[in-house]
Amino acid sequence: MQKQLQLLQDLQELDTEKKIVENDRQAGLNEKQVLKSEIDRLQQMVDSLAGEISVLEAEKAELNSAMALELENVERSEGRLPQIKTQKEYVAVLKEVDTANKLAKELQAKIDAKDEILTSLSTDKAEKDAELASITEEADSRCAEIDASLVAVNKQLAEMDRQREALLEDLPKGLRKRYGLLMSRRGGVAIVEARGGACLGCHMHLPPQTFNSLFVVNEIQTCPHCNRLLFVTKTDE
Ligand SMILES: [Zn+2]
């Protein structure tokens, strides 16, 4: 019985320690996830800016071709002027030139407006590119640190699992099952010390008989309040 109690205490100690290591491991994984989402967020911003810029550039290219067309029109109409015979025709061609010039001016204004937006978007993108590069560099180096510590942590966990298996092997099946059930139902604490007449798991007072029997009865006792397995240390005797 004493041997079983000792095994259970060792198992509890190991599992408590294992939980801390597992939490550390999870914290590392979470940190990597946070770094990754930050990079993803910036990458999305950069991509969206690049998309906007490429749409604007296509629109600007269209405006430029329309502009070239109007300038050609002006040139062609002006080229016809010397050959014109009638006043009526002359006025008509001048009107054509005027219209084409007006259109070209409007197109230029639109091109200028696109240029202004393009400049501002390009500045934004350059800033985000730089931010992304610097954050990626930081994240890469931090992730390398985390990965290195995860290798150590995984090794430690594997070793703990080995120790755990060895302890479990020496426990009777029924007790193993009870321990597992309590672990999952009682927040990872299955066996606790009873001291000063109380259960240190739930801090409730134990019936005096139960408490006293812990020192003499050759059977594993449980707390009537939280059902955890109880042990006493020699200093309580
Ligand atoms: Zn209790």
Image: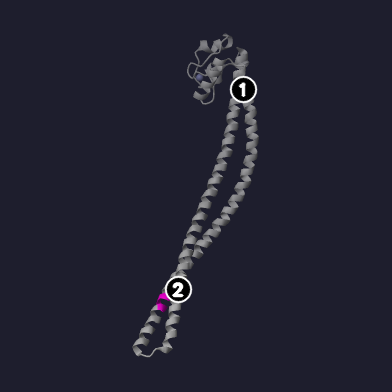
Looking at the rendering, the stretch of residues picked out in magenta corresponds to: 100-105
Instruction: Decide if residue 56 is on the left or right side of residue 137.
Output: left
The magenta stretch spans residue 56: no
Total numbered labels = 2
- Cβ of disc 1 within 8 Å of ligand 1? no
Distance of label 1 from label 2 (alpha carbons):
80 Å
Label 1 residue SS = helix
- Quadrant containing the C terminus is top right
* Residue under the image location 54 percent in, 44 percent down: 34
Residue 67's label in the rendered image is 2
Relative image position of residue 223 (x, y in whole percent): 51, 16
* Residue 110 x %, y %: 43, 70
The residue identified by callout 1 is 165
Seen in the picture, residue 121 relative to 26 is either above or below; the reply is below
Q: What residue type is disc 2 on? A: Met
| Residue at x 64%, y 36% (from the top left corner) | 151
Amino acid type shown at disc 1: Glu
Assign a secondary structure to mark 2.
Answer: helix
Mark 1 surroundings: few (<14), some (14-19) or many (≥20) residues within 10 A:
few
